[in-house]
Image: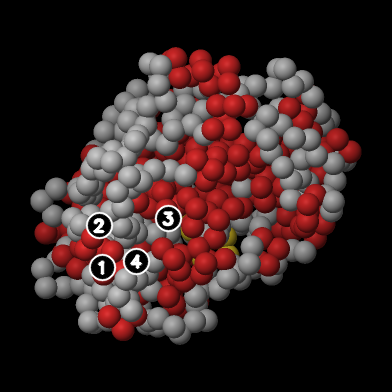
C-alpha cells in the first residue's frame, strides 16, 4: 500500500475554482504533463485521494458539513433551535464541498486526457482504471447535484489540460440531464467492468491491488458498487419527476436481472480506518473531533428506535446512543424552546439531559468503518421497489433483511472499536433482529413510510446527506421543523443549498445565466426535479 503515495498525482495547475494543492504531498507527485502511459493507475488513485475528505467520515466533513448543516436538515443529530441562524449553511463550508468535488473532477479529466492519448493496445490494459474512477466520480457528482441542483459538469475541469483560461468557464447542466448521464454510464461501466473481471492484463491486475484503496482490486466489489449506486439513483428518480419512467426501467433491469449488488456485511463499499496506511489519509482521531462537539441525540431518531414496536426497543439502540444522567434515552427535540435547550445543555455532566452518540461505536472508534454503500441501503431500495411494483420480489423480506443488515453494520462498528468508553455489546441472534423487524413491518399501516423511515435511520449520523435526500424525495419520516422568523434568508427548512460565493465570483457569466434560468434568484426553496 505504501507505494500508492509515492505515485499519486496532484494537479500542478490551478483552475477556475481556485483549487490548491496540499504542499505536503504535491512535491512528491508527478506533474500530469510529464506522466508516462503507466500513470493511469496512479491517476486513478489521485482521483480517489482528492475525494477522500468527503468519503471518509473525517473531521472536516462531519464537523463542518454533514453534521452542522445537513444533519440539521435531516434531523439525524440533535441541534438547538437557535434564532436567526437555524437553517443557515456556512458559505465557506458549502464552498469547500463544492471545490473538493471540482478538484476531484479536474484530476479525473487529466486521467481521461491521458487515456484518450494512448494507443489502442495500451487502452486495453489501462481501461479498468478509467472505469473505476468514473464510478467514483458519479458517486460524488450525484451528491453535488442532490445538494445544489443544476451544476457544471460536462465542460468542467479542463483548464489544466487546455490551458485556455478564457474557455475554461463551464456552463451549468440540468440536474435531470446529469442523472440521465449517470444512469446510462453506470450501466455501461458495469458491463465493461464485468467483461474485464478475470481478463485483465497482468500489469493492470498487479497495479490495481496496490493503487485501489477502496476495494483493493476486487472487481466483484466494484461491480456491486457500480450497480448499487445506479440502483440508488434510479430509485431516487422513480417516484416522481421527468425521469420517473427511466428510473423504474433501470430498477427493473437491475433487480429483475439479478445484477450483483451489495448484499452482506463483507460486501460493504467502505473505507477502512484500519488499512495499512490509514495515517496517510487522515488522523484516526479525526473521527472523534468530528463528532464530539455534535454528538447529542436527535429525539426523532430515538423515537423510531423506541416507539416502532409498543413496549420494545430496537436492538440497535444501546450501541447507537448512550443514556442520559437519569438513565433514560432523550434527545434534543425540535419541539423544545431554545431557552429550554440552553438551560439543559448548560448543566454539568452529572446532570446531563440529552443522550449522546455512543462513544465506543463512533466517537472513540479509531478503527471506524466509513460507509459508502451498505447492504442495508440496498435492501431498503429493494423493499421500496417491490412494494411499488417496480420489480418482482417480496417487500417484507427485503425490509427485514434491511434491518438485519443495518444491525450487523452498527454492531460491527461497535465490535471493531478498541474503545470501552461507551457500550460494548455482542449482537443478539439474527432471529431476535428479524423478529423485531417483522413486528415493525406488521405494525406499519403505511409500508412506504416505514421503509423510508428505517432507511433514514440507518443512514443517520453516518450518512446524513443520503438521509436528507430521502426526506426531500418522499417526505418521510414526518418531522417537525420550527420556523426561524428572525433569520434574514432561511426562515424555514430549505430544499437545496444555494450556490457558493466563489462560484458567483469565479464563474460569474455562467452563474448569472443559471440564475436567470431559475427565475432570477438563487432560490433555496426550489425543489430538485426528483423531490416531492
Q: Earlier in the sequence, mark 3 or mark 1?
A: 3
- For the point 44% across and 83% down, the residue is 421
Place of residue 268 in the rendered image (x, y in percent of width and height, measured from the top left): 49, 59
What label does residue 338 carry, if any?
2
The residue nearer to you, when weighing 103 against 426, is 103
- The secondary structure type at the circle numbered 4 is loop
Q: Can you identify the residue that label 3 sits on?
A: 67
Quarter containing the C terminus: top left
* Apparent side of residue 270 relative to residue 278 in the rendered image (left or right): left
Place of residue 104 in the rendered image (x, y in percent of width and height, measured from the top left): 65, 41
- For the point 42% across and 36% down, the residue is 497
Label 2, residues with CA under 10 Å away: few <14, some 14-19, many ≥20:
some
Q: Can you identify the residue that label 4 sits on?
A: 296
Q: CA distance from mark 2 to mark 3?
A: 19 Å
What label does residue 239 carry, if any?
none
Q: Can you identify the residue that label 1 sits on?
A: 343
Amino acid at each position: 500500500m505504501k507505494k500508492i503515495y509515492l505515485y499519486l498525482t496532484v494537479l500542478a495547475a490551478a483552475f477556475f475554482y481556485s483549487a490548491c494543492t496540499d504542499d505536503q504531498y504535491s512535491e512528491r507527485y508527478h506533474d500530469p504533463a510529464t506522466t508516462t502511459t503507466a500513470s493511469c493507475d496512479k491517476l486513478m488513485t489521485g482521483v480517489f485521494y482528492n475525494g477522500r475528505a468527503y468519503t471518509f467520515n473525517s473531521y472536516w466533513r462531519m464537523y463542518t458539513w454533514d453534521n452542522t448543516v445537513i444533519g440539521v436538515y435531516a434531523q439525524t443529530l440533535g441541534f438547538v433551535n437557535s434564532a436567526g441562524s437555524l437553517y443557515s449553511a456556512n458559505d465557506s463550508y458549502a464552498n469547500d464541498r463544492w471545490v473538493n468535488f471540482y478538484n476531484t473532477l479536474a484530476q479525473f479529466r487529466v486521467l481521461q486526457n491521458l487515456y484518450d492519448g494512448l494507443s489502442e493496445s495500451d487502452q486495453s490494459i489501462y481501461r479498468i482504471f478509467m472505469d473505476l474512477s468514473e464510478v467514483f466520480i458519479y458517486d460524488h457528482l450525484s451528491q453535488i447535484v442532490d445538494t445544489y441542483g443544476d451544476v457544471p459538469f460536462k465542460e468542467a475541469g479542463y483548464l489544466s489540460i487546455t490551458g485556455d483560461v478564457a474557455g475554461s468557464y463551464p456552463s451549468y447542466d440540468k440536474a435531470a440531464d446529469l442523472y440521465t448521464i449517470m444512469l446510462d454510464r453506470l450501466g455501461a461501466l458495469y458491463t465493461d467492468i464485468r467483461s474485464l473481471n478475470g481478463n485483465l492484463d497482468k500489469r493492470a491486475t498487479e497495479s490495481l491491488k496496490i493503487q485501489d484503496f477502496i476495494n483493493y482490486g476486487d472487481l466483484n466489489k466494484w461491480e456491486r458498487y457500480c450497480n448499487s449506486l445506479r440502483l440508488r439513483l434510479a430509485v431516487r428518480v422513480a417516484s416522481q419527476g421527468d425521469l420517473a419512467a427511466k428510473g423504474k426501467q433501470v430498477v427493473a433491469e437491475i433487480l429483475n436481472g439479478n445484477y450483483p449488488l451489495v448484499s452482506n456485511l463483507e460486501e460493504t463499499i467502505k473505507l477502512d480506518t484500519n488499512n495499512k496506511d490509514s495515517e496517510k489519509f487522515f488522523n484516526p482521531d479525526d473521527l472523534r473531533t468530528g463528532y464530539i462537539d455534535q454528538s447529542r441525540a436527535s429525539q426523532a431518531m430515538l423515537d423510531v428506535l423506541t416507539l416502532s414496536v409498543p413496549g420494545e426497543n430496537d436492538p440497535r439502540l444501546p450501541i447507537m446512543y448512550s443514556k442520559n444522567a437519569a438513565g433514560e434515552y432523550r434527545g434534543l427535540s425540535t419541539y423544545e424552546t431554545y431557552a429550554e435547550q440552553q438551560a439543559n445543555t448548560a448543566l454539568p455532566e452529572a446532570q446531563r439531559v440529552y443522550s449522546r452518540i455512543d462513544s465506543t461505536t463512533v466517537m472513540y472508534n479509531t478503527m471506524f468503518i466509513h460507509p459508502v454503500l451498505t447492504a442495508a441501503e440496498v435492501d431498503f431500495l429493494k423493499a421500496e421497489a417491490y412494494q411499488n411494483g417496480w420489480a418482482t420480489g417480496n417487500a417484507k423480506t427485503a425490509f427485514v433483511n434491511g434491518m438485519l443488515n443495518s444491525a450487523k453494520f452498527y454492531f460491527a462498528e461497535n465490535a471493531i472499536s478498541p474503545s470501552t468508553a461507551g457500550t460494548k455489546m455482542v449482537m443478539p441472534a439474527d432471529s431476535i433482529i428479524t423478529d423485531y423487524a417483522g413486528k415493525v413491518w406488521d405494525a406499519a399501516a403505511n409500508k412506504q413510510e416505514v421503509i423510508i423511515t428505517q432507511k433514514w435511520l440507518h443512514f443517520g449520523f453516518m450518512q446524513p446527506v443520503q438521509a436528507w435526500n430521502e426526506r426531500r424525495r418522499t417526505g418521510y419520516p414526518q418531522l417537525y421543523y420550527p420556523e426561524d422568523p428572525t433569520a434574514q434568508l432561511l426562515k424555514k427548512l430549505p430544499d437545496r443549498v444555494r450556490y457558493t460565493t466563489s462560484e458567483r465570483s469565479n464563474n460569474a457569466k455562467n452563474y448569472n445565466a443559471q440564475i436567470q434560468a431559475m427565475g432570477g434568484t438563487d432560490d433555496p426553496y426550489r425543489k430538485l426535479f426528483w423531490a416531492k
